[in-house]
Amino acid sequence: DLPIAKLTEAAKNITETIAKEGVSSWLEAAQSHHSHSYRHILLVAGHAVSFANDLGLSKEQQMLVALSALVHDLGKVRIPLSILDKPGRPTEKEEAFIKRHPEFTREILKTNSNLPKSVVDDAVTHHEMLDGTGYPDGLKGDQIPFLVRLLTLADTYSTLTEKRGTKSAMSPRQAVQEMARMPEKLDANLFRVFKKSVLDTGYGRIKRKKIEKLAI
């Protein structure tokens, strides 16, 4: 079983830390982790919670977003590290296997009834696209909940701005330009606000003190 109590406490710590300190210190600390998968989860959590805060979502909703981010790639535990951490591009077969991670996430989470339904929905559907071209279920339009759309933006942006293997990290401006080429896939209204947030020169810089250690 998943350590639900610890995950909930971690989500609370993320939400409170970003509310007090801003997201830039969190992201800086997250970048220090050597594990790409772990680092990605923390970066997605930081961007998602910061964006939820910018949108004026309640603390409860921010907690749900943080919890969703912490488990959104859970299914990747069933994918060998030799594939996940491969320095070059995965083969077509490997890519197809990687794309099964939301299905694996669903299988893992269905035995954990203590998780809120919205968290499970977010984790399983964060790769769904508004035009129906996403996976694992090909959902489209109104079938994709609001918080999933928010998490998808954070996940996409984090992936584009991360350095991984031979892939260089995009700058924030390059990343939003790339995302702007996906108007039929991403929520346009949410993206408009997200773009403004991450391109703000003061993005996340509420620094009362430097975060020396991530609170999870």
Image (tube, grey):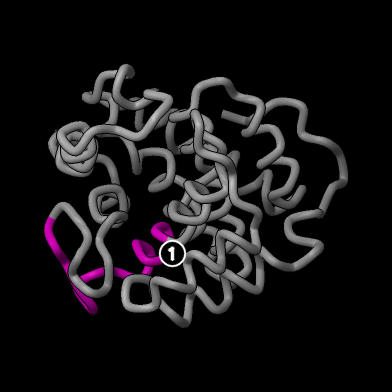
Magenta span has 151? yes
Say what secondary structure mark 1 lies in: helix
Q: Which residue does the image show at 53% across and 38% down from the upper left?
A: 42
Whether residue 45 sits left or right of residue 27 in the image: it is left
Q: What's the magenta bit mostly, secondary-structure-wise?
A: helix
Q: Quadrant of residue 206?
A: bottom right
Mark 1: amino acid: Leu
Q: Quadrant of residue 73?
A: top left
Q: Quadrant of the C terminus?
A: top right
- Place of residue 122 in the rendered image (x, y in percent of width and height, measured from the top left): 31, 54
Q: Which residue does the image show at 31% across and 55% down from the upper left?
A: 126
- Place of residue 124 in the rendered image (x, y in percent of width and height, measured from the top left): 23, 49
Q: Which residue does the image show at 66% across and 26% down from the upper left?
A: 32
Q: Which residues are magenta?
A: 137-152
- Place of residue 141 in the rendered image (x, y in percent of width and height, measured from the top left): 23, 78
Camera sees residue 112: no
Q: Nearer the viewer, residue 20 or 192?
A: 192
Camera sees residue 43: yes
Whether residue 136 sits left or right of residue 47 in the image: it is left
Identify the residue under disc 1: 150
Image height check: is 85 above or below 153? above
